[in-house]
Structures are given as structure tokens and as C-alpha cells.
Image: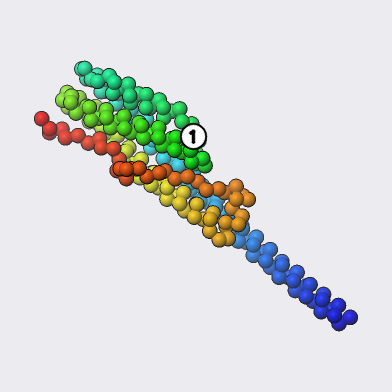
Amino acid sequence: MKKFGIGCGVLALLGVIGLIIVIVVALLAGGGYNRMVALSQRVNSSWAQVQNVYQRRADLIPNLVATVSGSANFEKSTLTEITAARASVGQVKIDPNSSPTDPAKLAQFEQAQGALSSALSRLLVVSERYPDLKASAGFRDLQAQLEGTENRISVERGNFNQAVQDYNTAIKSFPTVFFAGRFGFTEKPYFTATTGADKPPQVQFDFNKK
């Protein structure tokens, strides 16, 4: 009878310990889940800002092309290139409100935007050969807007990468790493660094150049 009583006491103790473990795990999971949700939302918010500034640049390009094409004998191949690059960007479909989870999709988006950046840079460099264009107030205004937009793109890409880093670190940290995947929280891709990516394309001209 005594042994039976001791056995029941051990079972009761184990039951209490098990209950405590369940409660602790539930609390940790609950707090971890809420934090993962918050971090995931921050990534999505940063992604939306990235999309906004890229869209701002795309919206400026038609006015830029119209202004530049008004200059006599402007190189048509340059205009064709930037128009085609802008169209290619529009063909990459990514939800503007939810950050991509597929690294290949983000790489495709980044490649298209990079091609547009290169085409835009070449167009602006070629524009230096046209004094009447450089003297145009409309062209100077577009140039200033583009310069500001390129700077903003660089900033928002950095903010996005930081948000992704915080999120990825959280889902790989203890104890979140044990249940993050069960709740659908998986690693998110970054923008990759390329040579000169820390600096926006140069769109500033020397208007005093003869």
C-alpha cells in the first residue's frame, strides 16, 4: 500500500511537471508566434515601400522619354532601349504587398530593375551631348526627380534587407526554430549586393561644361 502511494505521488509529480512544461512551451510559442507575425509584417511593409519607389521611377520614365525625344536627332536606339527595359520590368509580376519567398523570383525582379537602371543611366549620359536638352527646365526637373528616386530606392532596399535579416534571425533562433516552420514561417530572400549597388546610378550633370 505504501509503495502504491509513493507510485501515485511520483505520477502526480510527473503530471505536474508535464503540465508546467506544456504551459511554458505554450507561452514561449505564443510569444514567439506573435513576434514572428510582427517581423513578417515589417518585411511586407518594407517590400511595399521598395515597390513604391520603383514604381515612382517607372512613372517618371514616360515623361523623360517624351522630353528627350523632343530634342532634334536624339539617338533613337537609346530611347528604344529604355522603353523596352521599362516594359520588361512590368512583365515581372510580384505581389506588391507581400514580400517574395522565392529567391529566383526576387532575382528576376532585381535583374529587370537592374537592366532598367543601366538603360536609364545610358540615356542620361547620351543626353549630355545635347546642349538644348540640358538647358531645358523640364529636363532638369525630371533629372532632379530621378536622382531623388534613385537615392530613395537605395535606402528602401537597405531597409528591406534589414527587415528580412531580423525576420530570418528570429525564425532560426531558440526556441522559435522548433515551431516556426509548423506555422508557415520560412526564410525570406534578400536583395543581393552587386558592384556599385551601394550607390545609386549617377544622374547629375555638369551644366557648366562647354
Task: Report the residue at 40% width, 47% height from top.
Answer: 159
Task: Report the residue at 55% width, 61% height from top.
Answer: 174
Q: Dividing the picture into quarters, in which one does residue 22 lie? A: bottom right
* Residue 79, horizontal then vertical, whole percent: 30, 22
Q: Dividing the picture into quarters, in which one does residue 171 lie? A: bottom right
Instruction: List the single residue furthest toward the right.
Output: 1
**Judging from the image, what secondary structure is the residue with disc 1 in?**
loop
Query: In the drawing, does residue 199 fall left or right of residue 168?
Result: left
In the picture shown, does residue 29 fall above or below 96?
below
In the picture shown, does residue 43 fall above or below 2?
above
* Residue 175, horizontal then vertical, whole percent: 58, 60
Task: Report the residue at 45% width, 51% height from top.
Answer: 165
The quarter in which the C terminus is drawn is top left
Query: In the drawing, does residue 81 fall left or right of residue 164?
Result: left
Task: Report the residue at 32% width, 21% height from top.
Answer: 80
The quarter in which the N terminus is drawn is bottom right
Is 184 in front, or is 51? 184
Query: In the drawing, does residue 180 fall left or right of residue 194?
Result: right
Q: Which residue is mark 1?
A: 94
Q: Residues within 10 Å of mark 1 (few under 14, many from 20)?
A: some
Q: Dividing the picture into quarters, in which one does residue 89 lie? A: top left
Residue 87 shows in the view: yes
* Residue 55, horizontal then vertical, whole percent: 40, 33
* Residue 183, horizontal then vertical, whole percent: 62, 49
